Each structure stands twice: as C-alpha cells, then as structure tokens.
Image (cartoon, rainbow, N blue to C red):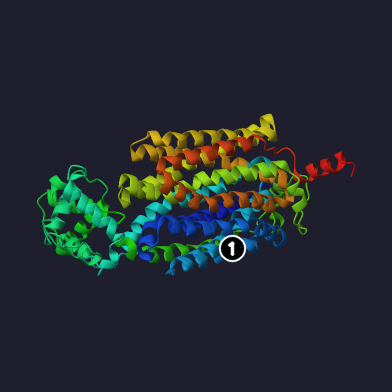
Amino acid sequence: MPKPTKVRFFVIAALMLMGVILYVDRYAFGIAQPYIRQELGLSKADFSYAVSSFFWFYAIGQMPAGWLSDSFGPRLLLTSYILIWSFFAATVGLAGSLVMLCLARAAFGLGQAGAFPTASAVVGRWMPAEQRGKASGFVALGGRIGGAVVPILSAGLLVAFLPDNQSYILTADQIIKPKELASDIATAIADDKVVPRYKSYIANQFASSFPAGTAYSPEVLATGLSKMIQDKDFYQKQQFDALNSLDKFATVQIEKLRQGGVLPIRDQERLNRHLLEAVFPENVQGLYVASWRPTLFLFAGLGVLGALVTWIVLRDFPGLHPRVNKQELALIIGESEDSQGEAKLPVGEILSCPSVWMSGLSQFCVNIGWLFIVTWFVEYLMEEHHVAMAERSDMIAVPLMVGFVGMLFGGVVTDKLAKRIGLRFGRAIPWTAAMILAAVCFLSCPLLADPWAVTWAMAFVALSVDFSVPSMWAFTQDVGGRYVGVVLGFGNMFGNFGAAVSPILLAQVQELYGWNAMFYLCGVMFLVAGLAAIFVDASRPIKSFDYDIRKSSGG
C-alpha cells in the first residue's frame, strides 16, 4: 500500500513563512520607534496612539476575517491578507505626521487581522486532531522567528541605509527638548559630582565655547555640540571609559584610536556624533532617523514572496490538492467527512460558551503584559540603562529567540497531556502554569539592576507565553470544529483589545509612576490571565455546549 504523502507538512511550512513575514513587518515598527518619534516630533504618549491604532483594528477584524476565510476558503483569503498588510506596511514608511502614522497602522492592523484565524483554520483542516497542538506550535513559531530576527536585521539595515553623504553636524531642529538639554548641561556645569564624568566633560566643553550668561537656545545648543563633533581631539579615553552604550561603529573607531590610529575626518565626526547621542539619547536626534523609512519599505516587500508561496502551496481542503494521495487524505480526515460546505457565523454558539469567554479574558490580560516586550522594552533599555542600538537589538532578540523553545515544547506537552488526562486539563494546565511563571518574572524585575538580568527575565516571560500558545490554538480547534477560524478570531479579538489598551496604559503608568510600576502592572495582568485559563474547558465543543444549554432549559 502506498505511504501517505507529506503535503500537509509543506502547508505548515508555508504558514510558518507567513508568520515570519507577519512579525517582521509588525515588530520593525517598534524597533524603529525612537527614530520615528524623533523625526516626527512625537512624545511617548503620542507614539502609543500609533501603536494602539494597529491593535484596535487588528482586534476588530478578527472575527469577520475568520468568517470570510471559513466561508470563501483560506487559499484566496490568506494570500489577499498578506498582500494587503504588506501594502499598508509600506505606507507606514510614508507617514509624515501622527495622524498619517495612526491611519497607516490602523489599515495595516486590519490587513493582518485575518492571518492567524485563517492559519488556525488551515491547521484544523489539514492536520489530524492528535497533531494540531504541535502544528499550531510550529505556525506560531514562525511568528517568533520573525520577531527574533527583526531586531538584528533592523540594526544592520538602519546602518546600511544611512546615506553616504549624511551630515553629522547638528542643526537646531535636531535638538529635542532644548529646555531639558539646556538644564541638563547647566546642572552638569554647576555640580559635576552629581553627573557621570563624560557628561561633565561635555558640559564644560560646551560652556567654553560661549561667553558666560549665553542663553542656551536650540541654535546655540546645536552650534556648541557641532563644534565638539568637528573636534578631532574630542574623544578622550579617561572621559568616556565608563560610557558603554555605544553603537558598534563607534566601538570599532574607539579601538582604532586606542591602538594609536588616526581616523578619517568623516569617521571622526560620526564617532563624535554617536558619543553625543549616547550621552543625550532623548535630546540629540539619532543619525538613523535618516534610514528608518527604507528599512520599513524593504520589510514590506517580503510580503510578495509570502503571498506567492501561500498561493502555490495551499488549497482550501486537502482533497483539492493534486499532490495529496488517498492515504494522506484518510490520515488527515479519518472517518469524518471532508466538508466543504459554507460556514455560517456561529455568534450564538460562541456567546453561550464560557470557555471561549475565559480564553478571551486570558488573552486580553496576556497581551497587556506581552506588549511591553515588543513596544516599550527598547525604550526602557535606552532610557533607563543607556544601552546602545547594537546591544539593544541583541537584547530585544533574546526573549523572542528563547521563546522558540517554549513554542516547540508547548505543542508537544499539550498534545501528550490531552491524550493522557483529557482535553479539559491537557489544555488548561500548560496554559495556567505558563501564565504564573510569566507573572513571577515580571514581578521580579524591580529587584534587578542589570539590563541583561531584566532581559533574561523578559526571556522567561516570552518562553512562558510561547509555551502556552499551542494550548490556546489547540483549544480553539478542539471547541471550534468547522468554525475554528471564527472561534480563534473571537479570542484574538479580545487579546488584541488588550494589545490596543497596553501601549497607552503602560505609557501613562510609566510617565506617572516609573518603570517599576509598569513591571508590577504586567505581573498582575499575567496572574489574572492564569486564573482565567484554569476555567477553559476544551472537552466541550461549541455545538455540544449549545445543545446542553437547550436541553437543560427544556428547548
């Protein structure tokens, strides 16, 4: 007898690629956020609205997009979703104001809304029930791969796209919050014991360029700092040896100087500019403001590749694929019918299922905490610990890379537990345990002084969240049946309402109460998510639960 073909694995691989591209496009925006804010003159609160606009429309589009895929087939719809979101990812790179940025991100979110509900429906149609957890883990893993590589790729592209003729001399409009910078310099001059040596050195160098009593206007600030940029002797080892938040280009040039080398004029000016940016990250516009737009354009172009692969590999049902033999088809669908009928929107069945509501609550809380890692973590590292772009990129990548492990093992564990102890606890136990571990990691962050220690705490948060994702997805496939796209969309909708609230809420908490309060808030959200997950029951599909309701009421 012929062996089953393996087309289903190629389908899962195509979905993984879709996930990679989806998260590359989504997270590149967060990596570039310091430079976007600087160029457009946005505060953290302003930028939080641009982040939030994506998630509101991403959330709103979940159920309709899932229903469209269930009704008209995932092949056409998923291909269309990829092309749509890629187009609007490119329009983000054209934004010139906060309003344009919010509109572009909102349209981008709407385009991405159908991706994972459709992917979950594909897993439900293409994989045997006992393999759905692992398959869901691999699809979600694609997203984490994209999220892990995008910081590293972004750092390289931001440098690569910096124009060759880029001026390193500062202009008045490149001084951000001039009153704050003037006060910082004045404080460093008045009492050099309260500031780091390198800041005192720069402040005194600055003061020596102007007569006493000079008002530090933006023009004066730009002139004084530019004079240091043009000074070939500005870098002094004894002054800057404690400054560790430097770009890789700067560290290479410093090593050349320490070995007795002489730098070309442009390399010297660029080094000096990086030194000033590292000392005043919130007040001196970054060089890479000039390169964030082409970086986003390049990432958006990856969607064309993803859409092409999806169209070639995927079919709406296994029985429609010319390369699927009878043995693979029987393995996938078992004794059930490979139904291709029209799917109706099962709103009543969903609304009457408590497990679906508990799943939505858990995902809502998870995303409030999770969004810190992919939005404000980069700002935390730059502002609180003055970590340079290259090292920030490494730190941001670590949690998402560590998450790979959770994603892979989460699928295996939930499938094995479901087989041994049943769907009820086979899905709920991994989900709940992961949420509690993530809560502990967040609550421990205020006790950690080293940025790498906080990074590893975030890595365990990512590990926990990713460990739980296969359980969440498998739950929707267990209870959703032919409505899996809609059920996943319902849970994702609530999860992304949390993601929409998160950037604004976290920004407000941070500005009013500080970073530690933000960590505590995220920890509490994960505790609530774990409590909700305990009550998720994957053993009661939507239809059977709806039947029980009617039966118990005499209907």
Left or right: 20 with respect to 251? Answer: right
Quarter containing the C terminus = top right
Left or right: 432 with respect to 175? Answer: right
Query: Which residue is rendered at x = 9% and y = 51% of the image?
Result: 260
Residue 133 on image: x %, y %: 62, 42
Q: Nearer the viewer, residue 191 or 324?
A: 191
Asked if residue 63 is positioned above or below residue 438 in the image, the reply reads: below
Q: Nearer the viewer, residue 338 or 393?
A: 393
Residue 466 on image: x %, y %: 53, 42
Left or right: 273 with respect to 453? Answer: left
Question: Mark 1: few, some, or many residues within 10 Å (few <14, many ≥20)?
Answer: many
Q: Quadrant of residue 214?
A: bottom left
Which residue is at the far front? 213
Do we see residue 6 in this rendering? no
Query: Which residue is rendered at x = 35% and y = 55% of the image?
Result: 155
Q: Nearer the viewer, residue 369 or 397?
A: 369
Left or right: 514 with respect to 248? Answer: right
Query: Which residue is rendered at x = 30% and y = 64% of the image?
Result: 162
Asked if residue 459 is positioned above or below residue 491 in the image, the reply reads: above
Residue 310 on image: x %, y %: 58, 60
Which residue is at the far right? 554
Q: Nearer the viewer, residue 542 or 82?
A: 542
Q: Quadrant of residue 228?
A: bottom left
Numbered circles on residues, count: 1
As helix, strand or loop, the secondary structure at mark 1 comes to helix
Q: Quadrant of residue 167?
A: bottom left
Question: Which amino acid, mark 1?
Answer: Tyr
Query: Which residue is rendered at x = 68% and y = 50% of the image?
Result: 487
Do we see residue 65 in this rendering? yes
The residue identified by callout 1 is 81
Residue 62 on image: x %, y %: 63, 56
